Image (spheres, helix red, strand yellow):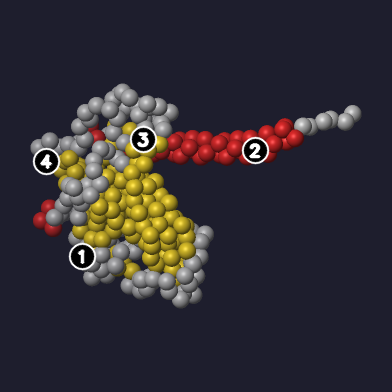
Amino acid sequence: MIKYYSPFMKYLVLVILPIFCITAFCIAAGITFALRISRNLKTTQPQGEVELPEVIIPTEEDLPEAEPPSSTPSAKLKVMSATLVGLWENEGYSEKAESKLAGVRILGEVKNVGGQVASEPTPVFRLFDEGNQFLASKKGTWTVPDSFHPLPIGEEILYDTYLSVEPESFHSIEISFNTQSVLTNPNPRIENLKIKDRAIAQKEASSFAKPNRPLQYLQFSGTLVNLGKIPVTDLAVSVWVKDSENKILAAEYVKYSQDILTTEQEIPILMNLLPFRDGDMKDHKVAIYGKTLE
């Protein structure tokens, strides 16, 4: 049997099929991004007033004389800022304020004020009651694996930690870092890794839980380039946004572990940052990491 296809049908196939494929791809990409944002919303405060514990930045005078059970907080890493957000039991965003606080996430900037390159510090949390009486010391956890890189003397870096303890069990929390691990022969600092054409802009994405209220997020873009003569590997980029009160509004960390940047080679950077809370962006900072491949 011979089947006849009119030129008009052929035209429809050639025109409509590509449009359908492109539309399906865009919808799938949008759904994937919305789902990824929804999973990250477990650190975003639900609707309603929720009282969080007070976060304390220690000074040299505040450090305890006696050693806590886990480790001794060191003054070599000085906490410059601290932002506390809640960790919720449920995943995704809820219109109701019935989500239970399951822990706290603290992130901010820390500076190396010691005489050696700091490496692999341990987050240490000290918990206090309403009368400012010491309750217990806890060992914190890094929110993003391998997110703390060796910190040279006099420089600052973003830290991102959390503690899975119910916030109702204490009134305030103090964060410091044990820095017994130092690098006596650290890898040379890579000065030739740069991000050119960097930009950050506010964006919106649809939400399944709140279809009539788009999610607000920040998008960082740029191009990572190696301007040196030695190839670089183990690449990572950290971006954090601060508000007018010097608190962290959003943060993101991305690794490019399989990439090797040779001379003048480039990698496009596109990072989406979901704000932890309401606030206006004042400025943002970027840190680049990598190791020379010789």
Label 2 and label 1: CA atoms lie apart by 64 Å
Along the line of sight, the residue nearer the viewer: 288 or 151: 288
Quadrant in which residue 9 is drawn: top right
- In the image, residue 228 lies at what x, y percent? 43, 74
Q: Amino acid at mark 2?
A: Val
- In the image, residue 130 lies at what x, y percent? 12, 36
Label 4 and label 2: CA atoms lie apart by 71 Å
- In the image, residue 285 lies at what x, y percent? 29, 56
Residue on which the image places disc 4: 132
Quadrant in which residue 17 is drawn: top right
Badge 1 or badge 4: first in the primary sequence = 1
Please give left or right for residue 247 compared with residue 36 in the image. left
Contact (Cβ within 8 Å) of mark 2 with mark 3: no
Check disc 2 and report its element: helix, strand or loop: helix
Residue on which the image places disc 3: 215
Image point (23%, 49%), residue name: 282
Could one spot residue 72 in this view of the protein?
no
Identify the mark at residue 113; answer none if there is no mark: 1
Mark 3 vs mark 4: give the one in front.
Answer: 3
Contact (Cβ within 8 Å) of mark 1 with mark 3: no
Contact (Cβ within 8 Å) of mark 2 with mark 1: no
Q: Residues within 10 Å of mark 1 (few under 14, many from 20)?
A: some
Q: Amino acid at mark 3?
A: Leu
Mark 1 vs mark 4: give the one in front.
Answer: 1
Check disc 3 and report its element: helix, strand or loop: strand
Check disc 4 and report its element: helix, strand or loop: loop
Check disc 1 and report its element: helix, strand or loop: loop
Label 2 and label 3: CA atoms lie apart by 34 Å
Image point (28%, 53%), residue name: 284
